[in-house]
Amino acid sequence: MQTMKLIFLGPPGAGKGTISKMITERLGIPQISTGDMFRAAIKEKTALGLKVQAILAAGALVPDELTIAIVKERLSWPDVRQSYILDGFPRTIAQADALAEFSELDAAVDFEVKDDLILFRLTGRRVCTSCGAIYHRVTKPPKVEGICDLCGGNLYIRSDDQEETVKARLKAYHDETEPLIGYYQKRGLLLTIDGSPDAETVYNTFISEIGRFLKK
Ligand code: ADP
Ligand code: ADP
Ligand code: ZN
């Protein structure tokens, strides 16, 4: 497989985590999720976790300096020298400018999903407390309710997936993240994918389209 350095754009609930995990499983490319890193820090009550807890709870964005610093550090690890998927970073123009200084991307993949479908997806999302696998009450139910198919861990509902917080997150997306679509379009890096069909279809579209962005 070729090497690939990708960012995943798209609103909350577009399926970024789901498609990233399929790519990690099937192609072995590491996923870096800033959301997962913040949630881990909150759970462990680290200094970072204490700083960002209220921000995530409100559905707002963590300040750029903090977010950029953790991504920059993570990208210095040897496992992501050749390939990575940045899931949920950058989310602002300032983050995109910073990223351009320390890494060179092959493509920015934008998963397009309309706001009404997002609300359905996020309010039905269930996540494994133990391995992070992502389920949905309707579109991807686990075999046994509340239990992860992969590891037997308990599933939970993210506290920021309640309707009021989802609305705040969607507003942050439209105000601060959506401008990145034009930013990457201008640089010839944008791959737009319809994120509304089932995950297997979205994955297959990604595989058939990404090749033209990769180095031979
Ligand atoms: P989703 O993909 O459902 O939007 P994430 O897990 O990617 O959720 O992000 C959860 C929360 O973590 C965001 O609402 C925000 O508070 C914070 N966060 C994640 N990534 C970033 C980022 N790049 N910049 C600022 N805040 C972020
Ligand atoms: P994001 O990382 O962009 O916030 P997720 O991958 O966590 O999005 O997906 C949000 C919810 O939607 C999850 O419950 C997931 O199971 C479900 N989901 C993701 N992709 C699809 C899809 N293509 N079709 C139906 N449901 C999906
Ligand atoms: Zn699990």
Image (cartoon, rainbow, N blue to C red):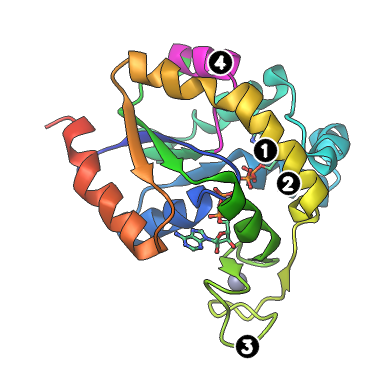
Numbered label attached to residue 93? 4
**Which residue is nearer to you in this view: 120 or 89?**
120
Instruction: Decide which of tag 3 and tag 4 comes sooner along the chain.
Output: 4
For label 2, the residue is 166
The residue closer to the viewer here, 145 or 119, is 119
Locate residue 109 relative to residue 94 in the image: left or right: left
Q: Residues within 10 Å of mark 4 (few under 14, many from 20)?
A: some
Say if 12 sits above or below 93 in the image: below
Q: Is mark 3 within 8 Å of ligand 3?
A: no
Where is the C terminus found, in terms of image quarters? top left
Counting the numbered discs, the total is 4
Q: Do the residues labelled 4 and 2 touch (CB within 8 Å)?
A: no
- Give the Cα distance between marks 3 and 1: 31 Å
Callout 4: helix, strand or loop? Answer: helix
Q: Please name the amino acid that badge 3 sits on.
A: Val
Farthest residue toward the left? 216
Q: Give the range drawn in magenta.
A: 88-101
Q: Disc 2, ligand 1: is the CB inside 8 Å?
A: no
Q: Residue at x 60, y 51 (%)?
A: 116
Secondary structure category for the residue under label 3: loop
Secondary structure of the magenta portion, mostly? helix
